[in-house]
Image (tube, grey):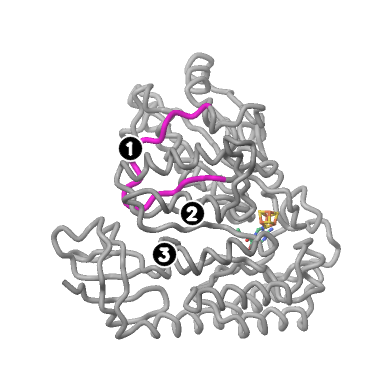
Amino acid sequence: MNVYDTTRMYDVMAPLGYTPSNSYEDADMVILNTCHIREKAEDKVFSDLGRVRLEKEKKKAGGEKMLIAVGGCVGQAEGAEIITRAPYVDMVFGSQSYHQLPEMVTKAIRDGGGVVELDFPQVQKFDLLPEVSNTQGVSAFLSVQEGCDKFCSFCVVPYTRGAEYSRPLAAVIYEASKLVDGGAKEITLLGQNVNAYHGEMTDGKTASLAYTIDALAQINGLERIRYITSHPRDMSDDLIAIHGSEKKLMPYLHLPVQAGSDEILKKMNRKHTRDFYFEIIEKLRKTRPDIALSCDFIVGFPSETDENFEDTMDLIRRVNYASAYSFKYSPRPGTPAATDENQVPELIKQERLARLQALIHEQQTTFNQSMVGKTLKVLFDREGKHNGQLLGKSEYMQSVYVKEIEGLRGKITDVKITGGFLNSLTGEVIN
Ligand code: 5AD
Ligand code: SF4
């Protein structure tokens, strides 16, 4: 979502003559669009700020100016504290106020910094943002939903992104058609709780995510639809069903469970059990047998025992994932779990994470190797790591590398898979 928000910041700043820059030397302003989800992400902001400060000083020595802004969820959570800790920061703003960037910049230039904007405005930023520009390319993001009302006991999102909000259906369809006009063939619908989406329609009813996917699939030129991130509780039957009926909806789902023990799930306030999760997976696989599943896991949540952790390992074995993200529990200020007395020692967290990741890597490699010899449709959207290589995504979200062929970039093409590895596939383009 921060990637999407950043493209919208470009749109907001374009009328003032600001364009994205690849180097500090050219930059009149540096915005760090930050993440607060775990302590590590937050620490990164301050180490990055140290580097940006040096660039600002270099400019100053040459008689030039550079504005430094901290936006996003760290901005939202820490506010003016950031300027106290790093006085060379000129502006701090939250994830709901970046539509006000032009005013903030004007104020920062006039007053020499000190701008803090953290409101959750009454009017949604989406209603005040300019139209999307066409900078996203063949694979584009589109935020349809923001915020969360679930309040998992470890998570800062309800506090930093605010209450759950869905954009009206017409706005979503309009933005999608603009992105497609600009060359997008794939759109990933975004939301912290994207499958809770319930967008207002002109007739006063609300559109579910499944209804929205169906509507978007009618757009000519749009070939792939994805959505991320979903909550098991909101995996409604119509959404599961559309995985079987809508060809443009990709056979991949990121469905975090966080833990495999009912005891821990309860303490996490996840509002679902492990059996409920298994039922959803079973329904999905019945509807779309080849669906690739992805997940998020937290290890070392307060009071997690060895036995609780083994339940998570068991869940992973039973589901069999195509990929997964996993994290050590990180206490976040203001969340209930942070003050739990039964924090798990760091060393135990490390051991559990290593074991869990080894299992996930095994499943991921097996999944990728199972593609060898098959023909997959790949959307090529960027250069590969090495010269003369192109990188694309399979329908199952795997990275696929091929030898570059002229005119291939931006297209969806059949690729015969020749190699399967932990994080990628290699293949040859079929004419
Ligand atoms: N500690 C560790 N991981 C966390 N996540 C969210 N909050 C925390 C936390 N306090 C993880 C969850 C979520 C993903 C985006 O980040 O797994 O799904
Ligand atoms: Fe955070 Fe997701 Fe739980 Fe919402 S549902 S509180 S975003 S982990």
- Label 2 Cα neighbours within 10 Å, binned few <14 / some 14-19 / many ≥20: some
Q: Nearer the viewer, residue 296 or 255?
A: 255
Amino acid on which disc 2 is placed: Asp
SS at mark 3 in the image: loop
Q: Decide if residue 104 is in sight here.
A: yes
**Mark 1 lies on residue:** 21
Q: Decide if residue 88 is in sight here.
A: no
Residue at the image point whose x is 49% and y is 74% from the top: 291
Disc 3 to disc 2: CB gap under 8 Å: no
Disc 1 to disc 2: CB gap under 8 Å: no
Which portion, as a residue range, is magenta? 128-144
Q: Nearer the viewer, residue 244 or 279?
A: 244
Q: Which mark is residue 330?
A: none
Q: Quadrant of the C terminus?
A: bottom left
Residue at the image point whose x is 15% and y is 64% from the top: 405
**Outermost residue, top direction?**
110
> What is the C-alpha distance between the residues marked 1 and 2?
37 Å
- Label 1 Cα neighbours within 10 Å, binned few <14 / some 14-19 / many ≥20: few
Residue 362's x, y, as percent?
50, 84
**Outermost residue, right direction?**
341
Q: Is residue 119 magenta?
A: no
Q: Is residue 142 magenta?
A: yes
> What is the C-alpha distance between the residues marked 3 and 2?
10 Å
Residue 186 location, quadrant:
bottom left
Which sits earlier in the primary sequence, circle 1 or circle 2? 1
Q: Which mark is residue 214?
A: 2
Which sits earlier in the primary sequence, circle 1 or circle 3? 1
Q: Nearer the viewer, residue 400 or 22?
A: 400
Relative to 276, residue 104 above or below: above
Amino acid on which disc 3 is placed: Lys
Disc 1 to disc 3: CB gap under 8 Å: no
Query: Viewed as shown, does residue 203 lie left or right of 395?
Result: right
